[in-house]
Amino acid sequence: MTQEKWTAVDRYFTDMLVPPDPLLEAVLQASSAAGLPPHNVSPNQGKLLMLLALIHKARTILEIGTLGGHRRAGQALDTLPQLAAEGCAPFDLIFIDADKPSNPDYLAWALKLSCRGSLIIADNVVRDGAVIEANSRDPKVQGVRRFSEMLGSEPRVEATAIQTVGSKGYDGFAIALVTSE
Ligand code: DHB
Ligand code: MG
């Protein structure tokens, strides 16, 4: 199997099942023109998130997403306590898709900002399979490994992780249901 085939299959399903969204297209073009990396989720992954939000009847959704980079990560870690202080929590669905070295911190915040029944979803936890490399020197790999360990030992959640291939390559996402406060 090749990247070319994964991309073609993504296009096949996206063309059939995910109608183009002009506003979303404009946002993606603007972010690419501004030199931001192409870290957006693929359209069919985005549709999965939308369906999960609908199935879950989520009314409050928090996206912890920074499009990469430590400067912005600092901002995310600044804004999360502000959200907590402002009483915006709990959120029904929290999507973690920011800089990967901070994933353990983001999970801690997601748990603080959730309640029983909240869904916590994290993108890019497989990283081309590098997640299994215990001695990896890549801080992103160590971030997603620590994140997975935290999920595994966290008594308040039931979680799993799913590997994916597609136009964005070989990666995967973790999904956790908060089962107790
Ligand atoms: C990276 C981050 C993402 O959110 C993504 O979808 C792909 C890659 C990264 O930081 O490498
Ligand atoms: Mg991502």
Image (cartoon, grey):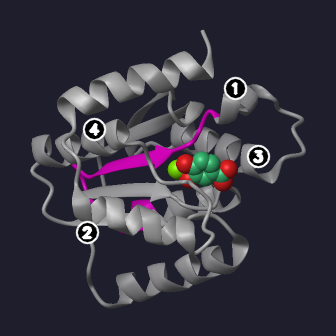
**Which segment is the magenta one?**
110-126
Q: Are marks 4 and 3 in contact (CB under 8 Å)?
A: no
Disc 4 is placed on an element classified as: helix
N-terminal-most mark, 4 or 3 = 4
Q: From what the image shows, is residue 41 above or below residue 31?
A: above
Q: Position of residue 28 (x, y in %)?
A: 42, 62
76 within the magenta span = no
Q: Position of residue 128 (x, y in %)?
A: 68, 30
Q: Amino acid at mark 4?
A: Leu
Q: Residue at x 20, y 27 (%)?
A: 16
Mark 2 to mark 4: distance in Å? 22 Å
Mark 1 to mark 3: distance in Å? 13 Å
For label 1, the crowd category at 10 Å Cα-Cα, with few meaning under 14, some 14 to 19 and many 20 or more, is: few
Q: Is residue 174 left or right of residue 21?
A: right
Whether ligand 2 has any atom under 8 Å from the Cβ at mark 2 is answered as no
Q: Which residue is mark 2?
A: 90
Q: Position of residue 134 (x, y in %)?
A: 83, 32
Q: Amino acid at mark 3?
A: Gln
Q: Is residue 144 left or right of residue 12?
A: right
Q: Nearer the viewer, residue 143 or 124?
A: 124
Mark 4 to mark 1: distance in Å? 22 Å
Q: Which residue is mark 4?
A: 48
Q: Which residue is mark 1?
A: 129
Q: Are marks 3 and 2 in contact (CB under 8 Å)?
A: no
N-terminal-most mark, 3 or 2 = 2
Q: Which residue is mark 3?
A: 142
Res 59 → quadrant: bottom left
Disc 3 is placed on an element classified as: helix
Q: Residue at x 34, y 66 (%)?
A: 26
Disc 1 is placed on an element classified as: helix
